[in-house]
Image (tube, coloured by chain):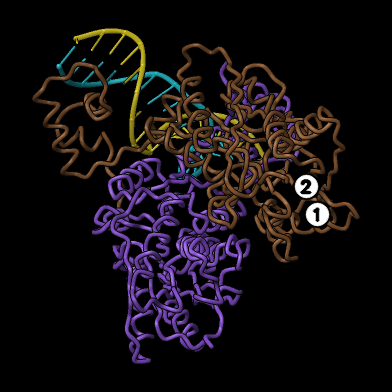
Chain colours: A purple, B brown, C yellow, D cyan
Amino acid sequence: MKKPITIHDIAKIANVSSATVSRVLSNSDYPVSKALREKIQRIAKEENYIPNLLGKQLKTNSSMTLGVIIPSISNPFYSSVMLGIEEAARKKNFHVILCNSLQNPELEDEYLKTIVEKQVKGLIISSISKDKKLLKSFIKTGLNVVAMDQKIDEENLCQIEFDYRKGGYLATKHLIAKGHRRIGYVTSLLDRPSRRSIFQGYSDAMSESGLEARIEEAESEEVYKGIYEFDSGKKLTGNLLSDPNPPTAIFACNDIMAFGVINELTLRGIQVPDDISVMGFDGIDFGQMIHPPLTTIKQPDYEMGKLACTMLLEMMGGDSSDSLNIMLQPKLVERESVRERS
Amino acid sequence: MKKPITIHDIAKIANVSSATVSRVLSNSDYPVSKALREKIQRIAKEENYIPNLLGKQLKTNSSMTLGVIIPSISNPFYSSVMLGIEEAARKKNFHVILCNSLQNPELEDEYLKTIVEKQVKGLIISSISKDKKLLKSFIKTGLNVVAMDQKIDEENLCQIEFDYRKGGYLATKHLIAKGHRRIGYVTSLLDRPSRRSIFQGYSDAMSESGLEARIEEAESEEVYKGIYEFDSGKKLTGNLLSDPNPPTAIFACNDIMAFGVINELTLRGIQVPDDISVMGFDGIDFGQMIHPPLTTIKQPDYEMGKLACTMLLEMMGGDSSDSLNIMLQPKLVERESVRERS
DNA sequence: TTGTAAGCGTTATCAG
DNA sequence: CTGATAACGCTTACAA
């Protein structure tokens, strides 16, 4: 495990200065004679030269690394987002550090801090922190940030939002159009703006049609684990069903929860969609794999990640630093878990 | 966006040398008088000092960053693994760079190279490259590697294997014990050792009981996307069903494919498990969410990631560099997609 | 076209 | 206990 070879070693072997070596090996456009250039390249190859990017980065103050902070990679929505981010990053030779905040604001801040210390200059974040104080302070000192999924009140950053309210509205409207009047809404704890917005859309659509909202909210938030939301969906469905006059359609705040709803219904011998219709929210792939295939609202996850990363890289390129604010639109995906109320 | 403050700036303010500042701010155990220590800490806080880890890393030749190369994060198995890795890494203040090789050996090598250039000293990899030449060469020059999931023939690295063969064997035996005699096996392309091993287990169990193997193999591999394997499961099921004497049980090489099998069966009016039993492999959470809940072989994904990372960190600690080789055991998870053949 | 030398921000060695 | 000072590996004025 001897010391790796540096440009100085190569310089010595080639009888040139390390400056010249640097110039050719870093693909600078600085003029170097063809003879020397080839000689140096040959030697570098022979000696198995591996550049030490830390040196370069320290000097140039640029780390070619992006940070991503999300609640949990085990949520299929975020893993799609991540795939999109990484795809876009790779094309520009950036690496991506993945941080799961696990719904824990302290963890989020800790990651934020260490990432900045590593001189990461670009961050994509779906923040769950309340005040976002630390994040805002880093933005002020030059960190480039694209906020995703959860809104941040602050200038100087790009935001990629998703129109959750409209999504909730669209879903509910669809149910109403199918003739449903008693529509229940099951949701995780309404502690995040995104979740409140979906609920808002639901409420708006209901009251617009003179219908009464009927909501079941999960009590507390466990550490993010898919199966937790599934169970939660089952439980809340039970609550809804205990009503003397239960709903004919159930709308869930995300697909996994909707799986729980369908599961509970099926277990109780209630047919979906014949007896009760079910509607999800997210549009993860698994929705197509269950029975019946889930009608849902699609969030463009992969595209969202790709877009976020492209915007971030552009921002860091520093061209037009007009901090954009993009609102992605929901799309209704009709499959087979909703049907006309006869 | 003025220049961030360094230990030198602090030294100047405090009227001490930067050496002293470094000693207190890096939590070195080097003795510094209490008075100075507190003064420096106070100033650091006041000035909002953010250490530049690049400088430190360059000096100490250690990057506190790990690399992870996996086929695709959108596969729920790997996202659980990743969650486990990150959990273990965080506890030791390491960050994790995520690289999706997308089943592409060239991408894998490219990542490998750039990661090493970034002075990442530890790597967890589920390699899909054939020769693994580059990887082996890096191991020789001191890269610490934990190979996961896919075996690598080489000394000097830890491996966390999973007993795929036994898993396949266990699953098949279970089906046989339930009275099944015609058991079909549907699988993705048998191009990886892990997949061949599962198939081997299946074959072994079948021939051991004097039963005839019946395999359907997907033709080619698409870029990794969950829905592809699902469709593939559907299609192969169709093939199996076209047999004049179709199987009474179908075993799939992974859970998602099993979802496809169940879906196709259900669509054709064939009851699972009443008419045909279905068995999966992986044990992802979604298996519990479909109907009927999938009987499957559990790979300890999250634990695998955690273990891999712990081992890697230990290796890098450099204590006992005995390169372990751990074989994780499969576990049968009985749910409701398999039933006794009457 | 090439070389010299001064850093980038940190730690580590050595002397005081 | 504290302070100079020399690295770490690289880039980049500036000089030649």
Q: Is B254 on the left or on the right of B311, as rendered?
A: right
Task: Residue A239: name its quadrant.
Answer: bottom left
Q: Residues within 10 Å of mark 1 (few under 14, many from 20)?
A: many
Q: Is residue A314 visible?
A: no
The chain holding disc 1 is B
Q: Is B315 on the left or on the right of B271, as rendered?
A: left
Q: Earlier in the sequence, mark 2 or mark 1?
A: 2
| Residue at 68% from the left image edge and 36% from the top image edge | B174
Q: Secondary structure at mark 2?
A: strand
| Residue at 63% from the left image edge and 27% from the top image edge | B161
Depth order, front residue of B108/B124: B124
Q: Residues within 10 Å of mark 2 (few under 14, many from 20)?
A: many
* Residue farthest front in this picture: B342
Q: Amino acid at mark 1?
A: Leu
Q: Where in the figure is residue A86, as x and y percent of width and height?
A: 56, 52
| Residue at 58% from the left image edge and 41% from the top image edge | B334
Q: Where in the figure is residue B123, as x and y percent of width and height?
A: 56, 31
Depth order, front residue of B230/B274: B274
The numbered dot on residue B186 is 2
Reply above or below: B103 against B160: below
Task: Residue B165: name its quadrant.
Answer: top right
Residue marked by disc 1: B236
Residue contact between numbered discs 2 and 1, judged by CB atoms under 8 Å: yes
Q: Amino acid at mark 2?
A: Val
